[in-house]
Amino acid sequence: MPKLETYKKQAKLLVRWHREGNFSIGGRIRQLERYRTLSDREALALKFPLTEAQEIIALEAGCANWAELKASTEVAPPTSEQPQPQNTAVASAKPVLYVADVAAAATFYRDQLGFRIDFLHGNPPFYGSVSRDGATLHLKLVHEPVFAAGAAERQGLIMAFIDTPNVRDLYTEYQTANAEIIQKLTKQAWGGTDFIIRDPDGNAIAFIG
């Protein structure tokens, strides 16, 4: 567990971000039950003393309040002088797709591709996440195209590869849902079978079995 001084710095940083009008902390403020229904703008309009920032940091650390967090850091066992081996395994990857409307993109992935909406951050949303089984895609708002017009199509750019054990069944599902399939189910020379879908923002997603 980090030292108490680290948590104090995190709380002070939250206060500073709130003072600077950083919309990214709206979701963190809504972790407090009394602020659950506030929009990002309403959260930034609050009086936000250090004690409330400390309350949020405590919740994020798994404690009921700041006093509990403080007590837990004071009784933490001293670290061994012997260096501990570190687990450097990589757990997962989350591709980030650039979209013109995060809410609309999330709705497309939910209604046509069977994903669930994990979260939408901001009001209106500027960042979000959708997932289906073990696959997760993040959605980021951009106000202008990231690639030159037609470049993604000409270069055959694929924004995400998603492994699936039942690629043929999934292909049939997406055909029924009228998704835009830009590459039909194909047996590839390298041994896999895949198909590619394009979302409304032009992002090509390959599903591979």
Image (spheres, helix red, strand yellow):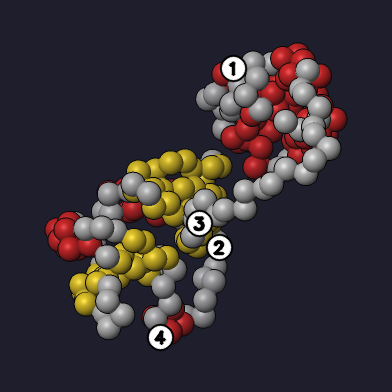
Residue under label 3: 93
- Where residue 25 sits: x, y (%)? 66, 37
Q: Residues within 10 Å of mark 3 (few under 14, many from 20)?
A: few
- Name the kind of residue labelled 4 in the image: Arg
Residue under label 1: 34
| Real-space Cα separation, disc 1 to disc 2, in angstroms | 33 Å
Q: Nearer the viewer, residue 103 or 33?
A: 33
First in sequence: mark 1 vs mark 3? 1
Q: Quadrant of residue 12?
A: top right
Q: Which mark is residue 6?
A: none
Q: Nearer the viewer, mark 4 or mark 2?
A: 4
Q: Nearer the viewer, mark 4 or mark 3?
A: 3
Callouts 1 and 4 close, C-beta under 8 Å? no
- Where residue 164 sits: x, y (%)? 29, 58
- Name the kind of residue labelled 2 in the image: His
| Real-space Cα separation, disc 1 to disc 4, in angstroms | 51 Å
In the picture provided, is 77 more to the left or to the right than 195?
right
Label 2 sits on a secondary structure element that is: loop
Q: Residues within 10 Å of mark 4 (few under 14, many from 20)?
A: few
**Residue drawn at the location 62% of the way across and 24% of the way down:** 62
**Residue drawn at the location 64% of the way across and 29% of the way down:** 60
Residue under label 4: 154
| Real-space Cα separation, disc 4 to disc 3, in angstroms | 26 Å
Label 1 sits on a secondary structure element that is: helix
Q: Which mark is residue 143?
A: 2
Task: Answer whether residue 15 is visible to the viewer in this image.
Answer: no
- Name the kind of residue labelled 3 in the image: Ala
